[in-house]
Amino acid sequence: MPWRRFRLGGFVDIDWSKAEAVCPTAKKPLSIWLDQEVVDFFQASGKGYQTRINAVLRHDVQPQKALKDRLRK
């Protein structure tokens, strides 16, 4: 059964069946310019919004890295 989490607009189901455990890595301080709407969205979900932004970026990067690795072989 999926967990339910409150997001803007109400509760959403979260399917953890495909979740992967990730060991924390060292973080690099960075100044980045984001659209205000993006910042507002993540901040609205509370403490840890920068970690969630990082998770979204990581989720996008991993398949691209895997594809590059396959093409190099």
Image (cartoon, rainbow, N blue to C red):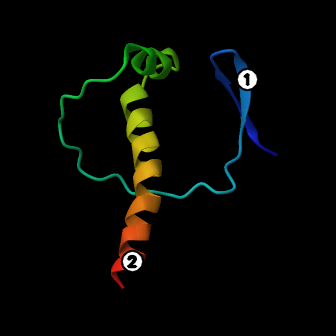
Q: Kindly check if marks 2 and 1 are in contact, taking CB atoms under 8 A apart as contact.
A: no
Percent x, y of residue 73:
36, 85
Judged from the image, the secondary structure of the residue bearing numbered disc 2 is helix
What residue does disc 2 label? 71
Looking at numbered disc 2 in the image, what kind of residue is underneath it? Leu
Q: Residues within 10 Å of mark 2 (few under 14, many from 20)?
A: few
Q: Nearer the viewer, residue 3 or 34?
A: 34
x 45%, y 49%: residue = 60
Q: Please tell me which of labels 2 and 1 falls first in the chain.
A: 1
Q: CA distance from mark 2 to mark 1?
A: 40 Å
Please name the amino acid that badge 1 sits on. Answer: Phe
Q: At 40% across and 43% down in the image, what residue appears?
A: 57
Estimate the x, y position of residue 61 in percent, counting from the top left: 40, 53
Examine the rendered structure and indicate whether residue 3 appears above or below residue 44: below
Q: Is residue 23 left or right of residue 41?
A: left
* In the displayed structure image, the side of residue 18 where residue 37 appears, left or right: left
- Residue drawn at (37%, 69%), measured in percent from left and top? 68
Total marks placed: 2
Figure quadrant of residue 5: top right
The mark found on residue 11 in the picture is 1
